[in-house]
Image (cartoon, grey):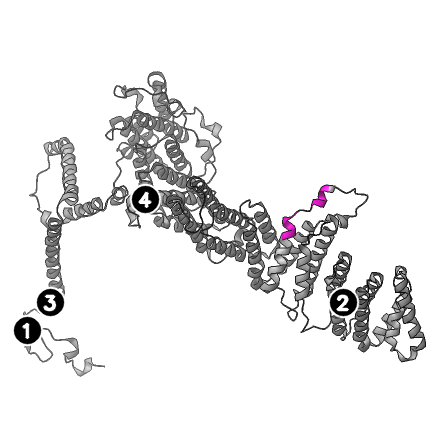
Amino acid sequence: MDYRAAADHHVCNGVCGCCGALRPRYKRLVDNIFPEDPEDGLVKTNMEKLTFYALSAPEKLDRIGAYLSERLIRDVGRHRYGYVCIAMEALDQLLMACHCQSINLFVESFLKMVAKLLESEKSNLQILGTNSFVKFANIEEDTPSYHRSYDFFVSRFSEMCHSSHDELEIRTKIRMSGIKGLQGVVRKTVNDELQANIWDPQHMDKIVPSLLFNLQHAEEAESRSPSPLQATEKEKESPTELAERCLRELLGRAAYGNIKNAIKPVLIHLDNHSLWEPKTFAIRCFKIIMYSIQPQHSHLVIQQLLGHLDANSKSAATVRAGIVEVLSEAAVIAASGSVGPTVLEVFNTLLRQLRLSIDYELTGSYDCAVVSTKIIKEHEERMFQEAVIKTTGSFASTLPTYQRSEVMLFIMSKVPLPSLHHAIDAGKAGENRNRLTQIMLLKSLLQVSTGFQCSNMLTALPSSFLDRLLSAALMEDADLRLFVLEILISFIDRHGNRPKFSTISTINDISVLKLKVDKCSRQDTVFMKKHSQQLYRHIYLTSKEESNVQPHYEALYSMLALISIELANEEVVVDLIRLVLAVQEIAQINEDNLPVYNRCALYALGAAYLNLISQLTTVPAFCQHIHEVLETRQKEAPYLLPEDVFVEMPRLTKSLDHLVPEVFFRQSKISEVLGGSGYNSDRLSTPYIPQLTDEDRLSKRKSIGETISLQVEVESRNSPEKEERAPAEEITYETLKKAIVDSVAVEEQERERRRLVVEKFQKAPFEEIAAHCGARASLLQSKLNQIFEITIRPPPSPSGTITAAYGQPQNHSIPVYEMKFPDLCVY
């Protein structure tokens, strides 16, 4: 103790000795706890007397606190830091011992002294004040305080969390003290509704960023690697670990109404410090959040992230991609609670962002945000789009089956399809936008459908969904068709057999594939009865496309194989064989002038499937026929087998015009051998012919004129002008023969008639088309008028007139309300 301090202390004791009777007892007791030399520490015996006095006379507790506060402030001003420590120790002991109703007034003095220490520039005093406050925070008070404020402490502790002291060790201590202080404030106030509301934005905007700041900056002190012998476990704890623990505790205490105020500062901090782009720290933060909050509140975090994504819709693609990546990670953690009550709103937001990104990519500007070059921006936008698609799948994987089906139907409804009168943008830019939108939405749908397990196919693929999906299968864009096939395969494959059909081959023994095969259920049978012809027609039409490449044929093969395994009964097997034979006929007749590769691919596809189905049916004669054809092809036409076609460098022939009949699978032979085993031979012997619908034709229409012409063509067939009934004709053998021979000519005439109708509506003057339509409209109106007259006119009475109640003949009908009825008929 320095000389001046000792002198002051002796003077004080001298005064007490002379005027002891004049000084209050509590002051004498307080003075006695201070030793002559502060290094000796608190005088314990005198401290016990002071504590006993405070417990015996609780009304004096506030005065004891005020006097201790007065001494501490004086000692701080005179730099007597030893006595400051003794005063704080005494205050701590009194706080721990006294729980009377007068404690509130004592606490005010205590908090005033803690605030005085925190205001000091000395780091050791700041730490001392913080430690005392933490001890106070752990005390459960018996009586509430209505007027106590912690605003200063929140601000000061937050400031300490951002300490930039030159010395690393001191900086670390100050930051850790700040975090502990914030933790104390939270513990003291979070569960007491009568205390200051710590969840108010004014407090959360200081507490949360302070904790994130320490999470963000891993201490350099860790790199010094102190010796385990020199540091205890508590001393090893870094500000980063302490901040994480405090943040978890804060979020774990958050109620439903406080989640928003706790999450908003996190989003603002990540924005201000540009922490979305590396996204590592952002993901770490939200992992802490999702694991800390109560599970039933997860969807609130997701909603705030979605709202933040909307708010940043014109930010750089890297920022938006970071937010979407965080959404994806958060959805996986939250599981079924991530989407909450507004399922479709989540997916609507993601799809809206996908559409905006496509517009940015095509237009080359964000309106507000400017990126250096368009090339970089396109690359970033593609990355963002892939992130959105991945996140869509992450959200969908958390949903139950019925909600997942709704989401898939919702996504499909957003795909622009001209065949279903969807809004289609015109022009070259519009075509690009439509194509990108279709691809991205179908990619999202594929992501959602991946891993989808549903025992009832009618539930998984309702008609409204399947119709739209199959419409996209007939688009001219090869990528779109491939996505549709992959989506259908993901629905049909319920036992994980798809990887076993990833390559097309004519395997000799399919038992090595170890296929998982279950008996076709009743629900699957009903589904195939309802939709099988629709599926077959689209498979047939897709196989004819000239733009098909190897992945398309692999997808077609997988789809045929999976239908055979998952959904097949005897009737389905028969229809699939007919379908594949019809596909072989496409390549054989070649009406569509397909290239050699496409024709060879169709032959190879048929060979691989028939080889598979023959081994699944286990009919020896059927297997023998397929084996014979495959052997013949191996010797004379190996370019018709998948092993030569579906390779990196296909080994093809220049012409397919001189193939021998033995290389084809014969429908008559297959019908014969399968008919002998109980299959429907009549159906097998009937060639498969797809029934083209208006939807199939419309799906490839490019102009409005073509669409209108098709509608008018359909109307013209059914118009009264064309209804000329031919006289009854006797049907003989010669008549039938003539009909078969003339069918080709009739078909040519039909095509020419259609061409003329289309050409008329594309090239004829508007006045001529309007006059034609007007004449037809007037004819239709006249027919309707006749129908209305017949319907409205009352039926004649047997005598040709209507007789009223009194027997007077009436030539016109009388309204019901004017008729007179007998009294017995009136109620």
Residue extent of the magenta highlight: 213-223
Question: Along the polypeptide, which appears first: circle 1 or circle 4?
Answer: 4
The picture quadrant where one finds residue 474 is top left
Give me the C-alpha separation between circle 3 and circle 2.
Answer: 106 Å
Q: Nearer the viewer, residue 751 or 794?
A: 751
The image's mark for residue 71 is none
Residue of label 2 = 113
The image's mark for residue 811 is 1
Looking at the rendered structure, the kind of residue marked 1 is Asn
Q: Residue at x 43, y 50 (%)?
A: 353
Disc nearest the viewer among 3 and 2 = 2
Percent across and percent down for residue 442 are 39, 43
Question: Along the polypeptide, which appears first: circle 4 or circle 3?
Answer: 4
Residue 703 vertical placement versus 139 (above, below): above
Question: Along the polypeptide, which appears first: circle 3 or circle 1?
Answer: 3
Residue 173 vertical placement versus 153 (above, below): above
Residue of label 4 = 429
Q: Residue at x 35, y 26 (%)?
A: 604
